[in-house]
Image: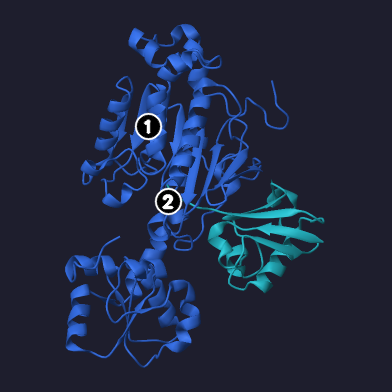
Amino acid sequence: MSVTLHLPTVLAKLADSQVIETSGQTVGDVVADVSERFPALAPRLRDEQGKPYPFVTFYLNDEDIRFQGGFDAPVRDGDEVAVVPAIAGG
Amino acid sequence: MTTGVFDATIGRPAPRVAEVNDELPELSSEEILRYSRHLILPDVALNGQRRLKAGRVLLIGAGGLGSPSALYLAAAGVGTLGIVDFDVVDVTNLQRQILHGTSDVGRPKLDSARDRIREVNPHVHVETYETLLTSANALSILADYDVIVDGTDNFQTRYLTNDACVILGKPNVYGSIFRFEGQASVFATEYGPCYRCLFPEPPPPGLVPSCAEGGVLGVLPGLIGTIQATEAIKLLLGIGETLAGRLLLVDALSLRFRTMRLRKDPSCPACGTREISELIDYDQFCGVGKERDVSDAELPELAPRELAERLQRGDDFDLIDVREPQEWEIARIDRARLIPLGAFTDALSTLDSAREIVVHCKGGTRSAKAVRQLQAAGFRRVWNLAGGITRWSDEVDPTVPKY
């Protein structure tokens, strides 16, 4: 399944790109694939157990994955996953 | 009336909006002329303008986001603007904080905000709170307002503002910025989600750099702050469709606006289960005090003057600068070697644990992390330069520019 992962600019430097073509059956697969390819990005996406952080929200086609099974949320060909980290500047 | 999945009433019921028009304040002739472009606008009109005049909006922070919000809310004729801030104007604020001017440097932000707002619109009543918003004062300060605009710059105050808004049932107009990106939403409306539904917990301290450390494009708070002002005005007027239930993401570099769907989390301790029925210790929740204790206890420090003496004596030690290349370009200490903090782990193998090492950054926070990494890797003779290159400029070499 071909899936597109969108990163915010602050994380894009760790993957040399803001948009990454990736694949997998679930959002967790997508995160695992990207984490393997870009080790510096990995700790910003999930914790040491491979679980999502409470301060980084993943959107699958503009819907929060927390309400779709978290990292178990299934992805389909052509889906978009966006990473939205908490920021606090004002 | 509903519009698809986003109920148009979701963000609507600010208490004053429900007031009958007879109770709304009248407009003077001068005000009628001043607001003429609103008065001829069908969805605002005379009664809408009277609602704005009756409206009370509280701005948390008079900084990057609070500045444009305050100016537009004042110009629009919101009757009462409350502002919470305890800072003084610093010259580095002026790149984005347009409430304050060059002649205001050193003045309390509340003073310059009050002067500027009076100049924009003398009909606006300004109420100021020169304090840090805390669990002890938040409920009593927020209680007097219809809409809260969150323009603060730290996670503790964001969670505090959110929880206070949920407890009091006040809409929380959220905005947040970092570097080139911004977020905006409307939280804590009657049926909508809150900040904790989006981010249940904050990142550990130090993981996300502040704007002071990471930088921010000056015009970005202008984009987000005016969106916050727009939402506050719509809430007061009870018109349109607010961002309640949606998260707006703005990327200034690509100039793309994306809207994500936000859902109310039934298990949210604030707006779902209502487990948080009173305000908590937000420093503790955000892990702020904890980190400070560890760093204070274990961090060997060197004062700038001591470093200067050692350099002058020609002592043999390594001086490592862990800032970013763009900061190195602005200012540096002679003899320092640049290893940005992000690359520090990889560079550990190039350092000699038998040698003495002094680490510095801009203010001492990042270098403290590097010192801890060195300690964890078995380095014993390491020091953090207290106050970083900023204090070095103050106390040793004023030709090194501060930024």
**Residue drawn at point x = 53 percent, y = 43 percent:** B276
The answer to whether one can see residue B363 in this image is yes
Residue sitting at 46 percent across and 26 percent down?
Answer: B146
User: Which residue type does callout 2 highlight?
Assistant: Asn
Chain letter, blue in picture: B
Q: Which of marks 1 and 2 is nearer the N terminus?
A: 1
- Place of residue B391 in the rendered image (x, y in percent of width and height, measured from the top left): 24, 66
Residue A12 position in % (x across, y down): 58, 62
Letter of the chain shown cyan in the rendering: A
Which residue was labeled with disc 2?
A: B154
Q: What element carries label 1?
A: helix
Residue type, mark 1 in image: Leu
Name which residue lies at 44% across and 63% down: B206
Element under disc 2: loop
Any part of residue B278 in sight: no
The 10 Å Cα crowd at callout 2, few under 14, some 14 to 19, many 20 or more, is some
> In the rendered view, how is the structure colored?
by chain
Output the chain of dot 1: B
Closer to us: B214 or B363: B214
Identify the mark at residue B117; answer none if there is no mark. none
Tell me: A25 left or right of B228: right
Image quadrant where one finds the N terminus of chain B: top right
Depth check, front residue: B218 or B66: B218
- In the displayed structure, A1 sits above or below B111; it is below
Query: As drawn, is B105 to the left or to the right of B31?
Result: left
Q: Disc 1 marks which residue?
A: B71
Question: How far apart are the two marked residues, 1 and 2, measured between alpha carbons?
Answer: 22 Å
Q: Name the quadrant of the C terminus of chain B.
A: bottom left
